[in-house]
Image (cartoon, helix red, strand yellow):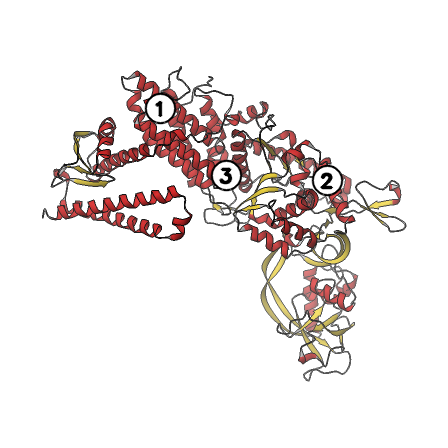
Amino acid sequence: MTKEVEMSTKYDPSQVEPGRYKEWIEKGLFKPNEDKEAKPYSIVIPPPNVTGKLHLGHAWDTTLQDMIIRQKRMQGFDTLWLPGMDHAGIATQAKVEARLAEDGISRYDLGREKFVEKVWEWKGEYADIIHQQWAKLGLSLDYDRERFTLDDGLSKAVRKVFVTLYKKGLIYRGEYIINWDPKARTALSDIEVIHKDDKGAFYHVKYPFADDTTFNGKNYIEIATTRPETMMGDVAVAVNPDDERYKDIVGKTLVLPLQGRHIPIIADQYVDPEFGTGMVKITPAHDPNDFEVGNRHNLERINTMNEDATMNANAGKYEGLDRFEARKAIVADLEEQGYMLKIEPIVHSVGHSERTGVQVESRLSTQWFVKMKPLAEAALKNQETDDRVDFVPPRFEHTFTQWMENVHDWVISRQLWWGHQIPAWYHKETGEIYVGEEAPEDIENWEQDSDVLDTWFSSALWPFSTMGWPDTESPDFKRYFPTNTLVTGYDIIFFWVSRMIFQSVEFTKRRPFKNVLIHGLIRDEQGRKMSKSLGNGIDPMDVIDKYGADALRWFLSNGSAPGQDVRFSYTKMDAAWNFINKIWNASRFVIMNLDSDVELSLPEASEWQLADKWILSRLNDTVRDVTRLFDSFEFGEAGRALYNFIWNDFCDWYIEMAKENLTGEDEKLKKNTQRILRYVLDQILRLMHPIMPFVTEKIWLSMPHDGASLVVAEYPVEHTEFDNQVAEKDMDNLIELIKAVRNSRSEVNAPMSSAIDILIKTKDDDTRKVFENNVDYINRFCHPKRLEIAADIEAPKLAMTSVITGAEVYLPLADLIDLNEEISRLQKEAKKLESEVTRGEKKLGNEKFVANAPEAVVAKEKEKLANYKQQLAATESRIEELKAEF
C-alpha cells in the first residue's frame, strides 16, 4: 500500500498537472505491454501538419484517441498508440515562403537545397511545439516509435508504392488539364479545390464569320463567356450535332476577335442545347471539358498563361499582364472595336486553392497521375467482405462509397521543393524515362524529375508504412497491423480515409483499420466554424492554462454524439471545472476519513447496509454501461452515465449517508463504511482516468492503493454479485421520500433546521419495511419532530401531500398551508404525471421499441408506467379530498 502527499484544500490544476506527464514518460508507461499473450490494440495518430500549432480540433481528435487507448491499456490489451507528423508539402512550403518573403527573399534566391534546409528548420521548430502540446494534453503516445512522413523508412515505402503502381500501369505521365495554384505554382487534386461564390459576368461577344456567311440575318454569332482572358486560346466554337438551329453553319469558319485567327464551328455532344445560346467556345488548354472536346476533334492546344497566371506570348499584346488585368484590357478592347454585345453581371461558383486561397486555373500541364478506377473498385469490393472497414456513424460509409464510385484519376505530382521527389529520371540525351526505387547507376547521364508527390500520397500509407512496411516481417507490422481504430474528422474522408483504404487493400491485401470513428468540427458558441477571418479561434493551450487539461478533455469527450459538430463555450468549460472540483472535494473528504490501516478489500456482503448494496449495484450498472458505451464510441453517453453516478449517487447521496456511520459509535460499521468508500472512489478514479488522467492519478496516489500508477492499473470490470435490483429499488424509494419532504419544506419555507411532523402512509409491507429499517437516514435528512410510518394513516385535513412510489407523504403544516395553493400544486403535479403516463404508453405502444429494446429496458419502462399510474391515481384522489374541505 503506497500513498502520495496529502491533497490541498482546493483543486488547482496548476498544482496537479505539471510534472506528471514527464513521470509517466520516464517510467515507460505508454509503451506496449511486454506480455505477448495479451491481445494487441493499435491506433496510429492522424499526423498533424508541421505548419503550426495544434488547434481545438486536434485536441478533440487526440483526446478521443487517448481515451480509447488508455482504457484498452487498463483492460490488459497490448496497446500501441503510434505518434507522428506530416510534412504537409504545399502547406508547409507556403508558410516558409511567407516567412522568407518578410525578409524580401524567395525560394528561387536560395535554390532548392538551401530552401529545403530552411523548411527542415521550420519542421524542427514546430515539431517541438507539437510535442509540448501533446504533453500538455496528456497523450499517452509511444515516442520510441514516432514517425515523420519524410523519414527514411516512410520514404522507402513511398518509393516502393510509386514504382509498383507504375509497373502495373496504375501510375502514368501525361499532358492533361489540371487544377493549378498560380501562387504556389503547383498542381492541385480536385479535392484541394474549394468552390466559393464570386461576383463575375457573362460577356456576350461577336464572333464574325470569315466569309460572307450570315446567320439569322447577321454576319456573326454570339458567344457568352465568363473568362474573356482565355479567348486567345480559343481554337473552335462548338454546337450540339442534334441542334437543328445550327446544322447549316457546322463546318463554317469564324474570325477570333482581337487576334484575327480563323477557327471552325464543330459539332460535339458535350454542348447542352438548352444552356445559353447553345454555342460554346472551345479552349482546350484552359478548360477540362474543352480539353476532351479538343482530343475528340484533334484540335490544337494553345496555353496562354504562365505558371504565375500572367499572360504568355500566345496572348499577343496582353503578354505579361496578370490574368485579371488582362481580362480588363481584353474587355476594353472588345468594347472599343465593337465586338462586345453586352455584359451581364452574375454570381457563380469559382474554384479556389484550399492552401493559398487564390483562384485556381484549369491549366494544360504534364503531370503524374494515379489510375483510380481499379484501386477504387478493389476497395469497394473489400467492403463486402469480413475485412471491411466499419464507419462510425455508419452513414459516413455512403460518403466514402459515393466518392469511390465517382472518383477521377488522381494527379499526384506537385511543382514544389518540399516533399518526396518523384522517383523518375530522364536520360539527358535520349529522353528515356527510368522509374525505380533507387537512382540509375550512371546517374551523371540522368536528371531526376524535379516535382514532388502530393502529401496525401505518403499519408495514404500511414497505417502500414509506420509499422515497418514494406518489410512484412517487421515485428510491429506483424503484431499491430491492421490497426484497430482510426479517429478523424468528416472533412477528410475524401482526402485521407479513402486513400488509406484503397492503398492498404492494394499493398497489404487488408483493411488499414477495423473502425473509423468520424467526429465533426468544433464551432464557436454561435455555431460558426472557427477561422482567422472571424477571429473566433480558440487556442487549446490557453484553455488548459485557465481550466487544466482534464477540464478541456472532459468537455471534448462529452461534446456530442459521433459524427456531430460541437460548440465550444466557456460556460461549458466552467461546468467541466466544477465537475472536477466536485470529484476533488468528495475525494478529499473520503481520504481524510480513511484510517491509515484501512483494508483495501470490501467487507463481507453479509455486513453491507442498504446504502452499501445500492452504491455497489449502481457502480456495477455504471461499469457495465460505460464499458459498453466506450466500445461503441458513445463517449457523450458514457460521460453522462459517469456524471450521474459520481455527482448524484456517490457525492450527493452515498457520501452524505456514510457520514452517519463515520461519526457514529459503531467501530465495525465505521471501518466497513471506510472500506466501501475507498473501493467505490478507487473504481470511480479508474473509470474516469482515460478521460481525466491528471487529476485521477493525483487523487489515486493520495489514497491507500496497490500499484504504481492508474495508467497501468486494472480497469473496472462487472461483478455480477454486486447486482441488486431490490436494493436499487428500495434506495430509490428512500431517496424519493427524502426529496419529497425537502421539496414540500421548500414550498412552504419550512427550513431543515425546524423539526416537523412527517406521516408516511405506505401501500405495501416492503415499502414500510424499507422506511422503518432506514429511520436513521430519514431522521438525518428530513428532521422529523414526530415520524409515523404505517398503512392505516389518515390524511390530515391541512397537510402538504407528496405521492411517491409505494406511499403518500403528509406534512401537517396547517399554519403554513393555503388550501387553494395546495390543490393548485397537486393539480400541476397531476399534469406532470399525466404526461409521463402518456409518454410511457406511447413508448410501450411502439412495436419497434418493444421488439428491439433489451428485455430489461422494456421491463423498466413497464415498471415506471405502473408507478406513474399509481401516483397519478393517488394524487387525483388527494385533490378530491382537499376539494371536499371547502
Tell me, for residue 157, which label it has, or none: 2
- Relative vertical location of residue 308 with respect to residue 199 in this rendering, above or below: above
Tell me, for residue 605, which label it has, or none: 1
Judge from the rendering whether residue 280 lies leftward or rightward of residue 773; answer left or right: right
Q: Give yes or no for contact between labels 3 and 2 (Cβ–Cβ under 8 Å).
A: no
Q: Position of residue 826 (x, y in %)?
A: 20, 46
Is residue 859 visible in the rendered image? The answer is yes
- Name the residue beneath numbered marker 3: 631
Q: Earlier in the sequence, mark 3 or mark 2?
A: 2
- Relative vertical location of residue 378 with respect to residue 630 in this rendering, above or below: below
Q: Position of residue 73 (x, y in %)?
A: 54, 30
Task: Give the quadrant of residue 786.
Answer: top left
Give the CA separation, mark 3 to mark 2: 33 Å
Please state which amino acid type lies under the numbered disc 1. Answer: Ala
Q: Position of residue 391 (x, y in %)?
A: 55, 47
Please state which amino acid type lies under the numbered disc 3. Answer: Asp
Task: Give the quadrant of residue 175.
Answer: bottom right
Judge from the rendering whether residue 447 lies leftward or rightward of residue 146; answer left or right: right
- Which residue occupies 67% across, 80% down? 244
The foreground one among 637 and 187 is 637
Task: Give the foreground label among 3 and 1.
Answer: 1
Give the CA separation, mark 2 to mark 1: 59 Å
Neighbour tally class for label 2: few under 14, some 14-19, many 20 plus, Cα within 10 Å:
many
